[in-house]
Structures are given as C-alpha cells and as structure tokens.
Image (cartoon, rainbow, N blue to C red):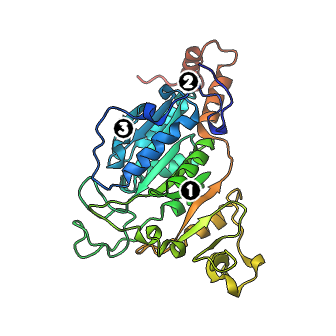
Amino acid sequence: MTTTELPFPGLSGVPTTEDKLTGKDFTSDQEVRWCPGCGDYAVLKAVQSFLPDLGLRRENIVFVSGIGCSSRFPYYLETYGMHSIHGRAPAIATGIATSREDLSVWVVTGDGDALSIGGNHLIHAMRRNVNLKILLFNNRIYGLTKGQYSPTSEPGKVTKSTPAGSVDHPFNPVSLALGAEGTFVARTVDSDRKHLTSVLSAAAAHRGTALVEIYQNCPIFNDGAFDAIKQPDTKADAIIPLVQGEPIRFGVPQEDGKGSKGIVRSASGGVEVVQTADVAESDLLVHDAHADDPSTAFALSRLTDAGVLHQSPIGIFRQVQRPTYDDQAREQIVTASAGQGDQRQALASLISGGDTWTVV
C-alpha cells in the first residue's frame, strides 16, 4: 500500500493500490434488481468502470445510500457501503468523512430521498462543504413506492398520489445546490456515458462537497420524462452545453458549425436565450464555473424549464475551492491535542474543563 499523489487532487493522501484494478473488480456478486430499461443500469456501469481510475484500494472507498431505487447501489459495488435510512445518507456520510480521512466517501440518493425527507441534510452537507461526492438520481417520480409525484415532478403531474394533478412547484436541484453555495455543482444524463464519466472524474478531483444531478429515466412510472434532451431530432435545441471558458451556444449547427442559439446577459441582470444571428459574438456569455460569486451559475440553472423539460443546461455549473468541514474539524482536534498527551486524554480534558456545575 502506498499514499501517493493521485491524478485526483481531491483524494490526495488516501491509500492507493499498487495493482491495476478493472471495472470487474468493482462489480459485486449480487443480482442487480432494477426494472428493465431503468437508467440506473447505465449509471452503475459508468461508475464501475470509472472507479479504477481513482487508483484507490476498494477498501478505501465507501458508498452510502438512503432509501429508493437508486439506494440499492452499494449492493452492486465491490467496495464498502451502507444502505442507510430515508434521507439521512448525507448525515451518515458526513460522520464517515470526518472520522476517516483515508476514505473516499460517496452518497447515492434520489430526488425523493434527497429533496423531500432528506432536504435538510443535503443542504447542510453542501453548506459545510464536507468532502463528499453526492450522486443525485433524478427521475422526477417516486419509483420504489410505485409512482407517486416527487419534489421534482412538474406542475400538473398526474400520479397515484395526485390524481387531479400536482399543485406543487418543483425543486430545481441545481438551483437548490447553488443557493446552498455548493462548491461543485453539475448536471449530466444517464444515457451520455462520455459526459457522465467526465463529470464524475471532475467531481472526484474536487476537495469538498460535489453534487452531481443525473437525469435518469424511469421506464415504468415516468417514461419519456427526458425525451427532449435524448431524442436525436430534439436534443440539439434542448441541451445547453456548459463548457468552461467557451461561449454558451446550442441549437442545430449552422453553416459556420456554431449553434443557432446562445446565452447572453438579460436587461434584468439574469441570462436569456437569443438567436446568435441577432447578437455580436462578444455578447455571448462565456461560461466560468470557477467564478466565486454563484449568481451567474444560478441564473443559468433557471434556464431549466419545470414542465416537460424542453431545455436544460448540462455540465459543471460551479467548481470553486473553499476549506472543507472535515479538514477543519480534524485540525481542531490536532490543535486541542497539542501538549495534552493522546487524543483520549485531550477529549477528557475538553469535557471536564471550563465551567462545571454540580446538580444535587
């Protein structure tokens, strides 16, 4: 075992393996039990093939999940894992990451698990910037419990729990993450293996909380929710690709090879879609995920429509550096332990020190 500098700075110092592992090494012997055609299969295969690139021992990787179809993930990976309780995976993962610096900690959750009962835990994990990688599978429905509307279902959604149509306004997970000032926020699609893998690589390299929303189709209870961004005849106009340092263009390519539409600053201070023929090249917004101020990233996230998803930005919205909760907590322990013997003695001193009262 070695502790070398990895190609992923976010995992520097974690024990590495001297043997080259493959995707098969990260595949467990458990039968994968998702419905035929579920987008979870594609994400699982991408993760299994991606994990060897981390260069880590399997014993130093842990996946924590909550409750839902996506939360079966830990069973299918030959790593450490925990199938925890509804909505609480970020809290449990925070404890693991804080107490075990030698582990690469991942959270797998769904739109219901993360944004309903688990919403509070999710936003505070991002606020604290714990060194976690959170994969949020968004199929815009409750799949495991057989088809109720979820916090990301569009208004008017007819389901078993909303027979007359949902009157709720849905969450935009990326907007929520940016509002919590997440230091790494991205969105990708289950069926785009190349893009999914590249975003996962960037998330793994990030030191701090990395939230990746993954659009994931549920063929049984919400089939076709993402057809606009997946069908060959519509995806060019539906996907707004975010590429660091490049002007934001999309739409069917014109003779010059550039997209027919683009993003510019709006008069109100946000962003808006325009025809590139109507504006100067210099007017197009150049994407900067590294900007410390999340305002522009938030404005881009609002381009996602809450209806049948006719358009949506895809890529890394924000990628900035900030001290992590777990690193700072460990530093405090070291400081408190200095000159006080071992950590147990230091802890006893902290508990019994300062103001005390005797209750009679």
For marks 3 and 1 on the same chain, the one whose residue lies earlier in the sequence: 3
Looking at this rendering, what residue extends furthest in the right direction?
A: 282
**Which residue does the image show at 22% across and 72% down from the upper left?**
163
Crowding at label 1, few (<14), some or many (≥20) Cα neighbours within 10 Å? many
Residue to which mark 1 is pinned? 186
Residue 180 seen from this side: no
For marks 1 and 2 on the same chain, the one whose residue lies earlier in the sequence: 2
- 312 versus 188 height, above or below: below
- Given the image, on which type of amino acid does mark 2 rest? Asp
Q: Disc 1 on helix, strand or loop? A: strand
- Given the image, on which type of amino acid does mark 1 rest? Ala
Asked whether 39 or 101 is in front, the reply is 39
Marking on residue 236: none
**Which residue does the image show at 34% across and 36% down from the upper left?**
75
Q: Disc 3 on helix, strand or loop? A: helix
Residue to which mark 2 is pinned? 19
Q: Are marks 2 and 3 in contact (CB under 8 Å)?
A: no
Residue to which mark 3 is pinned? 76
Disc 1 from disc 2: Cα separation: 31 Å
